[in-house]
Image (cartoon, helix red, strand yellow):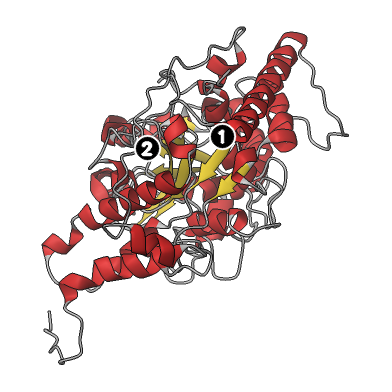
């Protein structure tokens, strides 16, 4: 790698990360108190110890929705809050209102499950039905309650480009699209006007942008260490915990981040106690690497072409899909290497390519296939899952330890096929063993589930952004904060 000659005015490379962090967090145009805060802080960030509140454990079986919907007497956390002065009475009353609001939502969901009917203040233009949902009544009423009640406060601290913006194209696009949706006042009806009315709190940081700006230039293998990312996120939490009461009163349980970058899970590794209640919304939802299905949220990976919100719809009807199975992609990770070893360009019905033949169209081939293989790459998630759904192609999940998106609500067994890595040599036999009738039912369910993976700007009911928010909403419903009396 070529070496760079430093001029007398050049900042040494090892000082760049802390200086950039200082600029991003304290010179933010949205942060009117940044100078005052910098003067009274003894470091770049507050040294105030953040709370490590212990909250009730969530179920770990991936069916969080059922634990919520079956609660009859919601138990409040046993954590006792610190004594508060009279000036905090207003905040106490706002917390009381929030918890009462959540209690009403839980009651409405429970009633819908029992009565198998929904209750809404307005006409519902879409009613979830069928076996693609784990519990259609619970989901529908929960979504109604979310639209009616859920408010999210997006912290204003931090400056662009690593806060308040993210990539809106290519494989990390969902990260930036969500930040953009939730980070401009008035754009989303879910945005709280004041933090006291918020049920949840969003940290608008972009791991993709942090890696791009803080980790450049890469001059050695050591530069890939996650320590700078971890320090930056930890310090940001300490800033907001020092300025506001919200992190400490919940131990971070009502706070969340959204990221599709492979490194995102590691933000919490350096300080697991601080982040033990924190909600990480991640594309890299690998349960073998610390992803917690009951607390964290699996984020669909969406590869967006520049200037577009999705791929062209080239899906064909079932009787015009001559290809049994299709995959094209790089030899990333061990699973794909095994797939290529057994199937790469070896079969006329199972079309597996590392590079597409000249003249072939990737999206068109998906639209002509009955089944689309979605093997994990370097990480468990792949944009092919969403691409397959958009193409009306039944996804074939080939992965280990992947917690599927929206698994609290959607029953993936009804519209996808799961093939263990050990059975990759049997792919053709497995898929040919699915009857025509069963395939047609699965394909029809793929068409029905498409609306939950469509990106709209602004977001619309039941689309991908609503589904992400609903996943966070479920986790907020699953615990209560102690209300001072």
Q: Secondary structure at mark 1?
A: helix
Residue 243 location, x and y as percent? 45, 48
- Disc 1: which residue: 88
Pick the residue in front: 362 or 453: 453
On the image, which quarter does residue 215 sit in?
bottom left
> Where is 53 relative to 338, above or below?
above
- Crowdedness near tag 1: few (<14), some (14–19) or many (≥20) residues, C-alpha within 10 Å: few
In the image, which is nearer the foreground, mark 2 or mark 1?
A: 1
Callout 2: SS: strand
Q: Is residue 30 above or below residue 89?
A: below
Q: How many marks?
A: 2
| Residue in the foreground of this view, choosing between 232 and 327 | 232
The image shows residue 163 at horizontal and vertical percentages of: 45, 61
Which residue is label 2 attached to? 398
The residue under the point 66% across, 36% down is 150
Percent of width and height locating residue 71:
59, 11
Residue 204 in percent (x, y) is at 48, 54
Q: Does residue 304 appear left or right of residue 104 in this picture?
A: left
Asked if 257 appears above or below 17 in the picture, the reply is above
Q: Quadrant of the C terminus?
A: top right
Q: Earlier in the sequence, mark 2 or mark 1?
A: 1
**Can I make out residue 326 in this image?**
no
Displayed quadrant of residue 435: top right
Tell which of 243 and 11 is nearer to you. Answer: 243
Structural crowding at the residue carrying mark 2, measured as other residues with C-alpha within 10 Å and reported as few (<14), some (14–19) or many (≥20): many
Q: Is residue 449 left or right of residue 170?
A: right
Q: Residue at x 44, y 58 (%)?
A: 172
Real-space Cα distance between discs 2 and 1? 52 Å
Rendered residue at 35%/47% (across/down): 238
Residue 133 disc label: none
* Viewer can see residue 419: yes
CB-based contact (under 8 Å), mark 2 and mark 1 = no
């Amino acid at each position: 790698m070529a070496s760079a000659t430093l001029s007398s005015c050049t900042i040494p490379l090892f000082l760049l990360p802390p200086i950039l962090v200082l600029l991003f967090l304290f010179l933010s145009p949205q942060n009117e108190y940044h100078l005052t805060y910098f003067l009274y802080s003894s470091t770049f960030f507050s040294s105030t110890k953040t709370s490590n509140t212990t909250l009730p454990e969530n179920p770990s079986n991936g069916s969080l929705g059922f634990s919520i919907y079956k609660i009859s007497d919601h138990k409040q956390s046993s954590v006792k809050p610190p004594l508060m002065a009279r000036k905090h009475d207003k905040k106490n009353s706002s917390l009381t209102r929030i918890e009462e609001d959540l209690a009403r939502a839980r009651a409405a969901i429970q009633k819908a499950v029992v009565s198998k009917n929904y209750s809404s203040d307005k006409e519902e233009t879409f009613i979830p039905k069928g076996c693609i949902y784990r519990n259609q009544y619970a989901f529908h009423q929960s979504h109604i309650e979310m639209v009616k009640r859920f408010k999210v406060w997006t912290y204003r601290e931090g400056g662009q480009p690593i806060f308040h913006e993210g990539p809106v194209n290519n494989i990390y696009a969902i990260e930036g699209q969500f930040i953009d949706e939730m980070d401009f006042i008035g754009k989303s009806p879910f945005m709280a006007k004041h933090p006291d009315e918020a049920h949840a709190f969003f940290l608008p940081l972009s791991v993709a942008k942090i890696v791009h700006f803080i980790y450049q230039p890469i001059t050695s293998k050591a530069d890939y260490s996650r320590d700078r990312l971890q320090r930056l996120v930890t310090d940001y939490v300490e800033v907001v915990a020092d300025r506001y009461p919200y992190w400490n009163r919940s131990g971070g349980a009502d706070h969340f981040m959204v990221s599709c970058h492979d490194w995102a899970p590691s933000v919490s590794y350096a300080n697991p106690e601080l982040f033990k209640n924190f909600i990480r919304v991640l594309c890299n939802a690998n349960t073998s690497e610390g992803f917690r299905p009951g607390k964290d949220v699996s984020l669909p990976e969406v590869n967006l072409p520049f200037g577009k919100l999705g791929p062209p719809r080239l899906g064909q009807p079932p009787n015009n899909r001559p290809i049994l199975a299709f995959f094209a992609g790089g030899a990333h990770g061990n699973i794909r290497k095994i797939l290529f070893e057994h199937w790469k360009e070896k079969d006329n019905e199972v079309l597996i390519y590392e590079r597409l033949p000249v003249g072939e169209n990737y999206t068109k081939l998906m639209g002509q296939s009955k089944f689309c293989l979605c093997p994990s790459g370097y990480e468990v998630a792949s944009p092919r899952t969403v691409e397959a759904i958009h193409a009306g192609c039944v996804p074939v999940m080939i992965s280990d330890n992947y917690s599927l998106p929206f698994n609290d609500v959607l029953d993936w067994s009804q519209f996808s096929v799961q093939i263990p890595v050990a059975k990759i040599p049997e792919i053709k036999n497995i898929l040919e063993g699915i009857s025509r009738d069963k395939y047609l039912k699965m394909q029809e369910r793929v068409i029905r589930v498409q609306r939950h993976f469509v990106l709209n700007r602004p977001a619309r009911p039941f689309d991908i952004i609503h589904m992400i928010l609903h996943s966070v909403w479920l986790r907020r419903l699953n615990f209560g904060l102690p209300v001072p009396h």
